[in-house]
Image (tube, grey):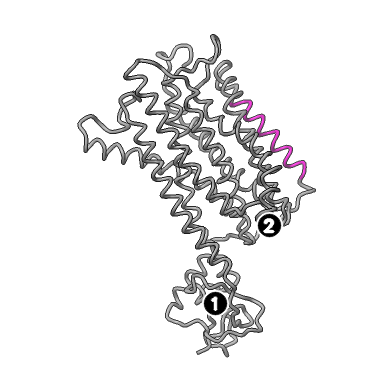
């Protein structure tokens, strides 16, 4: 394609099948490696130690270095030597990583598999629905060592034991333990926080699509012989992360710890909120720069330098450092056995939902703006000078700010309910509440 694009033949049949199988294997492998690798590394530390926060920063630093190499050196190799060389080097790097991982097997702190987490969740929901007409104990036994929280009290009905004098053991689909119910409560409680990061990843999608298209319409020349590939603009946030993460850990965390007393400087929820707030300014910067680029191209016929759009990548890099690492740390610290890997996995699901939302927004905006104007939608053309990408960026900035306000509500709600004193519960020997009238 690079030498003779007109004669490039479309892959069909077996070649197409091989391509798509390989593509989905990459997605499957990445989906298996990222959440499990992060959770496995965190398992090597005690959950309440400062080292755990240090680990998450170090893990994301390593991730950023890998992204930077992929978006700079690997792109250069693929451009000059061919795609097959780039894929071959990637496969070799993964093989080296696998060998390194396996070589330390004897030294890891391993948690044995404990079965599916979905079955206990389903059992709590089914038991609570089946006993929805019953009443939770109003006079609990204060001598009981197990306690339950006050949120989502409806689920507590899954712990009610029918016929207290009956020694026959009830089905796990009708009677659940308090700890089992509490896990489901925590899972439900973190869903709003997870949902607030979807818009954040929708903004990330723009930096990997429209912002690259912006760069293609700008002057990419750095020197007489050196041009910046627009796709390499995505490396800017990771360059920033490589420099900022060590400074954040070395200087900001000790400084903030002296003020807040928190082992990580600021809590994971505060860190996520700071990142979501900054993401809004990334879109504001993108909108302002796109307006300047468009007006310069239409009114004066000038092509401005690609460096004008670097601020939106720099701001988002700082935002990602706060939000992404904070979200992983927040999920892992929910103190749920068997669920750390699951929570880390749904962190990456936020990326998927964010990119899907981006596609929906583009289609929806095009449909609405096309219907209200004879000039076409904001994003209807392949020519950015005919589109109104700046207005789309402003729309995302507004959505990002509203998402931040929504996050503040849910973060405060989560902190409030997490800090409420738990209530003692009267339990039977098999872990359920006695059905006390």
Q: Residue at x 48, y 59 (%)?
A: 410
From the top left corner, tell me how far across and down residue 168 is, in percent.
58, 84
The residue at the far top in this view is 224
100 magenta-colored: yes
Disc marking residue 159: 1
- Can you tell which of label 2 and label 1 is closer to the viewer? 2
Question: Mark 1, residues whose alpha carbon is within 10 Å: few (<14), some, or many (≥20)?
Answer: many
**What's the magenta region?**
87-104
Query: Relative to 204, is 85 on the left or the right?
Result: right
What residue do we see at 63% from left, 59% from top? Answer: 338
Upstream in the sequence, badge 2 or badge 1? 1
- Residue beneath label 2, please? 261
Q: Tell me if 354 is positioned left or right of 149 in this view.
A: left
- Could you tell me how far apart the alpha carbons at marks 2 and 1 are, in whole angstroms? 37 Å
Q: Quadrant of residue 302?
A: top left
Q: Nearer the viewer, residue 172 or 69?
A: 69
Q: Is residue 421 above or below residue 79?
A: below
Check the image and name the residue furthest to the front: 259
């Amino acid at each position: 394609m690079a030498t003779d694009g007109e004669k490039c033949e479309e892959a069909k049949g077996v070649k197409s099948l091989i391509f798509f199988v390989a593509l989905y294997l990459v997605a499957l492998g990445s989906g298996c490696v990222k959440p499990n690798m992060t959770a496995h590394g965190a398992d090597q530390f005690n959950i309440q130690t400062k080292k755990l926060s240090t680990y998450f920063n170090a893990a994301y630093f390593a991730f950023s270095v890998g992204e930077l190499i992929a978006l700079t050196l690997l792109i250069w190799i693929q451009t000059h030597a061919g795609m097959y060389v780039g894929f071959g080097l990637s496969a070799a790097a993964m093989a080296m990583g696998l060998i390194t991982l396996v070589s330390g097997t004897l030294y890891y702190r391993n948690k044995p598999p404990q079965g599916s987490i979905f079955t206990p969740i389903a059992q709590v929901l089914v038991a609570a629905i089946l006993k929805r007409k019953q009443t939770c104990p109003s006079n609990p036994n204060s001598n009981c060592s197990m306690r339950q929280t006050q949120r989502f009290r409806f689920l507590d009905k899954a712990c009610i034991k029918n016929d207290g004098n009956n020694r026959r053991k009830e089905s796990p689909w009708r009677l659940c333990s308090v700890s089992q119910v509490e896990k489901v409560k925590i899972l439900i409680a973190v869903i709003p926080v997870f949902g607030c990061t979807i818009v954040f990843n929708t903004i990330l999608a723009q930096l990997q699509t429209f912002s690259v298209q912006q760069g293609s319409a700008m002057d990419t020349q750095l020197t007489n012989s050196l041009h910046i590939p627009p796709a390499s603009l995505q490396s800017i946030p990771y360059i920033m992360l490589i420099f900022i993460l060590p400074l954040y850990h070395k200087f900001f965390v000790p400084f903030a710890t002296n003020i807040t007393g928190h082992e990580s400087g600021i809590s994971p929820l505060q860190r996520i909120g700071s990142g979501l707030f900054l993401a809004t300014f990334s879109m504001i910067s993108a909108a302002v720069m796109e307006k300047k680029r468009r007006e310069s191209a239409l009114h004066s016929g000038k092509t401005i330098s690609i460096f004008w759009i670097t601020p939106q990548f720099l701001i988002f890099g700082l935002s990602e450092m706060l939000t992404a690492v904070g979200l992983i740390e927040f999920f892992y610290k929910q103190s749920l056995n068997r669920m750390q890997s699951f929570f880390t996995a749904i962190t990456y699901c936020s990326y998927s939902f964010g990119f899907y939302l981006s596609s929906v927004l583009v289609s929806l905006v095009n449909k609405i703006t096309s219907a209200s104007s004879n000039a076409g939608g904001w994003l209807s053309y392949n020519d950015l000078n005919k589109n109104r990408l700046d207005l789309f960026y402003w729309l995302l900035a507004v959505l990002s700010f509203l998402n931040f306000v929504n996050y503040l509500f849910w973060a405060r709600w989560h902190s409030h309910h997490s800090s409420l004193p738990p209530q003692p519960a009267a339990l039977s020997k098999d872990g359920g509440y006695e059905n006390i009238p």
